[in-house]
Image (cartoon, grey):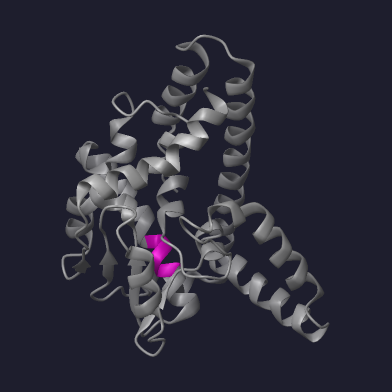
């Protein structure tokens, strides 16, 4: 499993020791860094279990995947949801599948959903309430639910190669390669793409081995070269929106978080 620990340690150093001390920022950074490492260990364990019980995923082909890559806040979610309605052709990623990218976890979730349904969905109603509580404030910008189509940026986040890290570590220039992996050295790019391919292979193996992968990745504008090298038969969908609107809307997602931990 690829994890750019050097960039992670650099981000921690910049946030904790290169800025004036603020208790609030330290609390945010240490809390979410701890949660991140906990999930990282959970995913690594699940991937190890896959190698034992679901090792056939390694032979899963990925033919002509479709990537929706466009500036954030340009309509990519709508395009993804419309295309994902064609379930006979496409297989997409749901939010919980990006958080737990291992076959064993997806099989476990399938079993729990079946059990919950047989009991009248008590846990489903609790999770629904939690989703509205946790994600409801984002509904006007980007509605998120665990069982709905979502972009696969979380897969890159586990490698610490995602623009999303700038929410907690707003040091874009110093951590440029984290948000734009095409800037990585060639050997690290290959390792990152090998990790990403293994995640997609697991997903197809568990959810539709003969279907076409449909991925939405607005954060992957800085990963297009790497994706083309890894998937030369890939198809790309992009959407054009005026930068005056797209950039302002995108920054509006980051600013509230920055104001929370670094006012």
Is residue 199 rendered magenta in the image? yes
Residue 136 drawn above or below residue 67: above
Looking at the image, residue 113 sits to the left or right of residue 180; the answer is: right
In front of the other: 254 or 110: 254
Per the picture, the main secondary structure of the magenta-coloured stretch is helix
In x, y percent, where is residue 241?
A: 22, 57
Q: Residue furthest top?
A: 20
Numbered range of the magenta stretch: 198-202
Q: Is residue 190 visible?
A: no
Residue 115 in view in this figure: yes
**Which residue occupies 21% across, 47% down?**
243
In the drawing, does residue 178 fall left or right of residue 238?
right
| In the rendered image, the vertical position of residue 114 relative to residue 28, given as above or below | below
Left or right of 1, for residue 30: right
Foreground pick, 177 / 123: 123
Is 213 left or right of 18, judged from the image as shown?
left
From this view, report whether residue 259 is shown above or below residue 101.
above
Front-most of residues 171 and 79: 79
Residue drawn 22% across the image and 36% down it: 185
Image location (x, y in percent) of residue 98: 50, 60
Residue 207 in the magenta stretch? The answer is: no
């Amino acid at each position: 499993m690829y994890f750019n620990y050097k960039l992670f340690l650099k981000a921690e150093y910049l946030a904790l020791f290169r800025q004036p001390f603020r208790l609030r920022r330290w609390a945010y950074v240490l809390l979410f860094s701890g949660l991140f490492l906990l999930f990282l260990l959970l995913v690594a364990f699940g991937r190890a279990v896959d190698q034992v019980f679901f090792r056939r995923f390694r032979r899963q082909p990925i033919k002509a995947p479709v990537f929706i890559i466009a500036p954030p806040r340009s309509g990519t979610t709508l395009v993804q949801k419309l295309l994902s309605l064609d379930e006979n052709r496409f297989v997409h990623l749901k939010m919980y599948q990006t958080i737990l990218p291992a076959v064993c976890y997806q099989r476990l979730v399938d079993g729990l959903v079946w059990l919950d349904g047989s009991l009248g969905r008590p846990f489903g109603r609790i999770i629904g309430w939690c989703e509205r509580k946790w994600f409801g404030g984002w509904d006007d910008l980007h509605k998120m639910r665990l069982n709905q189509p979502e972009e696969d940026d979380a897969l890159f986040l586990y490698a610490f190669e995602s623009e999303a890290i700038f929410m907690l570590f707003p040091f874009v220039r110093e951590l440029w390669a984290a948000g734009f992996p095409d800037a990585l050295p060639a050997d690290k790019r290959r390792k990152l793409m090998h990790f990403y391919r293994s995640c997609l292979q697991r997903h197809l193996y568990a959810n539709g081995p003969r279907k076409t992968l449909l991925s939405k990745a607005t954060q992957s504008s800085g990963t297009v070269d790497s994706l083309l090298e890894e998937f030369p038969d890939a198809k790309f969908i992009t959407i054009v929106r005026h930068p005056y609107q797209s950039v302002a809307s995108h920054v509006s997602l980051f600013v509230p978080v920055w104001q929370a931990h670094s006012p």
